[in-house]
Image: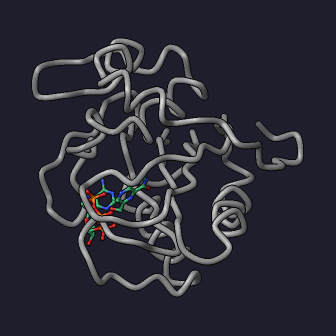
Amino acid sequence: MSRAVLSAGSNVGDSLGYLRSVVEAFADELVAVSSVYATPPWGGVEQDDFLNVTLLVEGPGTARDFFERGVELEQAAQRTRDIRWGPRTLDVDVISVVTDGRVVVDDDPTLTLPHPRAAERAFVLVPWLEADPDATLWTPAGERPVRELVAELDPAERDAVRVVGRLETGGRA
Ligand SMILES: Nc1ncnc2c1ncn2[C@@H]1O[C@H](COP(=O)(O)OP(=O)(O)OP(=O)(O)O)[C@@H](O)[C@H]1O
Ligand SMILES: Nc1nc2c(c(=O)[nH]1)N=C(CO)CN2
C-alpha cells in the first residue's frame, strides 16, 4: 500500500481540463486535493503562468506505478518535452511516497524520491500544505514539516501563488 503526493501543472492549452484529467484518473484513490492555484513560472524560462494542483492519493502498488500513470496522463495531453522547465500541457510530478509506512528515498534519475526540487517550489508546497496541513517532506537534512518549508520560502514567491478555484471530486476528497 502506498500513499503518494502528486503535483500536476499546466500552462498550455486547456490547463484546467488537463488538471481535471489527473483528478479523474485518481478519483478512486483520492485522499485530498488542493484548490487550483495560478502560479508564476518557476525556473527562469519566460512563459505564461501555470495552473497547479496537489493531490494526495493512496492505493495498492508502488511509487513507480503512480509515476507511470502520471506519464500516461502526460502522453494523453500530447505533452512534449522541448525546454527544461518550459511550457507544457501537463506535468505530473511524484513529490513523495510512503510505502508500507516507510518514506521511499531513491536517487534513480527516472524517479527520484522525494522529488529533489520540491522543497524550493512554492507551487508544490503551498497547495500541498492546504491539502495536508500535517505533511512532512524528507530532505537530506532530515524530515521537515511542510509548514516550516512554506514559512522559509521567499515571501514574494509564496504570496504570488494564489487560489483560483477548485476541481470537482465527486465528493471523494
Ligand atoms: N519524482 C519525479 N517525478 C516525476 N518525474 C521525475 C521524478 N524524478 C525523476 N523524474 C524524471 O524527470 C524527467 C524530466 O521530467 P520533466 O520533463 O517533467 O521535468 P521537469 O518537470 O521539466 O523538471 P523537474 O524534474 O524539475 O520537475 C523525467 O524523464 C522523469 O523520469
Ligand atoms: N509555477 C510553475 N512553474 C513551473 C512548473 C509548474 O508546474 N508550475 N513546471 C515546470 C516544468 O518543469 C517549470 N516551472
The image quadrant of residue 47 is: bottom left
Residue 124 image offset from top left, x and y in percent? 43, 40
Establish if 4 lies above or below 73. Answer: above
The image quadrant of residue 58 is: top right
Establish if 87 lies above or below 19. Answer: below
Scheme by which the image is coloured: one colour
Tell me if I can see residue 59 in this picture: no
The residue sitting at 67% across, 47% down in the picture is 29
The residue sitting at 20% across, 44% down in the picture is 116
Establish if 130 lies above or below 27. Answer: above
Residue 162 image offset from top left, x and y in percent? 59, 35
| Total labels drawn | 0
Q: Quadrant of ligand 1?
A: bottom left
The residue sitting at 21% across, 53% down in the picture is 112
Which of 72/19 is in front? 19
The residue sitting at 48% across, 27% down in the picture is 159
Residue 10 image offset from top left, x and y in percent? 53, 64
Which of 164/96 is in front? 164
Q: Is residue 81 left or right of residue 76?
A: left
Q: Is residue 6 left or right of residue 152?
A: right
Residue 155 image offset from top left, x and y in percent? 36, 21
Residue lying farthest to the right in this orientation: 170
Tell me if I can see residue 50 in this picture: yes
Name the quadrant of the C terminus: top right
